[in-house]
């Protein structure tokens, strides 16, 4: 697989049984649905994939099941997120052993350091990994915003292959995209936005990694293809539809954070018959009652669920 991953690369949720174990049949149905929609890659064990909630055994099980099912049809990226470099390297080795095509790592966290610590972290990962490394910019979770100049230097030196940008900083993303283009595009730039993917494409993004694609992959695939064809009206039309659908994460009441976001994705997928339960990892709680009804109403408005 090429290191230059482009297109729609959904960050796949991890379906769980009522006992909290990986629900393999549901996982395979979800992966099949993504592949049938024409996605360009799959990101396992990202934030939507419960990487922060998963022990080593669960991570290994997710990658083993996912890589086996995908069987080389599209690139598989694996989250190797952990607090410090040595721990991340252990996850890199485990992911490589499962046959993934690239790994995705955040800045180190908990024992926070300055910019020089973050840069060294990625330099060590890039030099040690046998597969391409993607830098994951998600300051809301790791409390470090990745510096664009650092990313460009690492990409130019071949130490990272790209960036998965979930920073929410559209200005910084635009600056990075411009600098990347001027440098000959050493980085593959993937936006983690669900609602303003069209804006990222206008900035020159190489693709998207939208959690909402778990629920509706086809509109993101159509949007990517319209972008490649220069059909900006279609790009906007698909985005407007997806913005309305993204309301599944805002209509709930009495929940916040992970339970509201990934919890809504799982609840929608259960309502659509793709996964068997909307079970969440401890300590997050599954959505119930009126919150499920509110999500169902949004799905009906989007014509994904029968009335």
Image (cartoon, grey):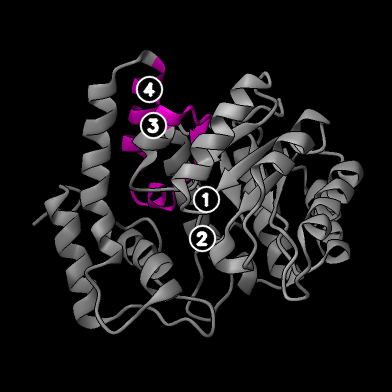
Callout 2: SS: loop
Viewer-nearest residue: 113 or 249: 113
The quadrant holding residue 295 is bottom left
Residue 139 versus residue 258 in the image, above or below: above
- Residue 89 % position (x, y): 86, 57
In this rendering, the count of numbered labels is 4
Residue underneath mark 3: 221
Tell me which label, 4 or 2, sits earlier in the chain. 2
How far apart in space, not on screen, are marks 2 and 1 (Cα)?
6 Å
Q: Which residue is mark 2?
A: 48
* Residue under the point 64% across and 35% down: 75
Quarter of the image for residue 21 reads bottom right
Residue beneath disc 4: 227
Looking at the image, tell me whether mark 3 or mark 2 is earlier in sequence order. 2
Q: Is the residue 8 above or below the residue 230 in the image?
A: below
Dot 1 corresponds to which residue? 11
Disc number lying in front (4 or 2): 4
Q: Give the residues in magenta.
A: 201-228
Q: Earlier in the sequence, mark 1 or mark 3?
A: 1
Residue 36, label in figure? none
Q: Residue at x 8, y 57 (%)?
A: 307
Badge 1 or badge 4: first in the primary sequence:
1
Give left or right: position of 102 versus 269.
right
């Amino acid at each position: 697989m090429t290191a230059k991953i482009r297109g729609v690369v959904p960050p796949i949720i991890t379906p769980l049984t009522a006992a909290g174990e990986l629900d393999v049949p549901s996982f395979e149905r979800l992966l099949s649905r993504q592949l049938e929609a024409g996605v360009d890659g799959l990101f396992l064990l990202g934030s939507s994939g419960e990487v922060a909630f998963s022990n080593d055994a669960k991570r290994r099980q997710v990658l083993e099941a996912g890589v086996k099912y995908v069987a080389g049809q599209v690139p598989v990226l694996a989250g190797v997120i952990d607090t410090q470099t040595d721990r991340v390297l252990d996850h890199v080795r485990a992911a490589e052993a499962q046959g993934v095509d690239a790994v995705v790592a955040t800045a180190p966290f908990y024992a926070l350091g300055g910019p020089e610590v973050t840069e060294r972290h990625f330099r060590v990962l890039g030099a040690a990994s046998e597969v391409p490394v993607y830098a994951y910019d998600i300051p809301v979770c790791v409390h470090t915003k990745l510096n664009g100049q650092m990313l460009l230097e690492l990409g130019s030196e071949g130490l990272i292959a790209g960036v998965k940008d979930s920073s929410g900083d559209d200005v910084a993303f635009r600056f990075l995209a411009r600098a990347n283009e001027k440098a000959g595009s050493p980085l593959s730039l993937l936006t983690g936005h669900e609602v303003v993917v069209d804006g990222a494409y206008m900035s020159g993004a190489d693709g998207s990694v939208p959690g909402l694609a778990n629920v509706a992959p086809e509109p993101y695939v159509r949007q990517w293809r319209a972008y490649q064809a220069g059909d900006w009206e279609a790009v906007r039309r698909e985005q407007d539809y997806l913005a309305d659908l993204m309301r599944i994460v805002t209509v709930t009441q009495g929940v916040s954070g992970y339970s509201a976001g990934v919890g809504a994705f799982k609840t929608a997928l259960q309502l659509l018959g793709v996964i068997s339960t909307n079970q969440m990892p401890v300590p997050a709680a599954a959505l119930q009652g009126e919150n499920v009804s509110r999500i169902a109403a949004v799905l009906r408005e989007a014509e994904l669920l029968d009335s």
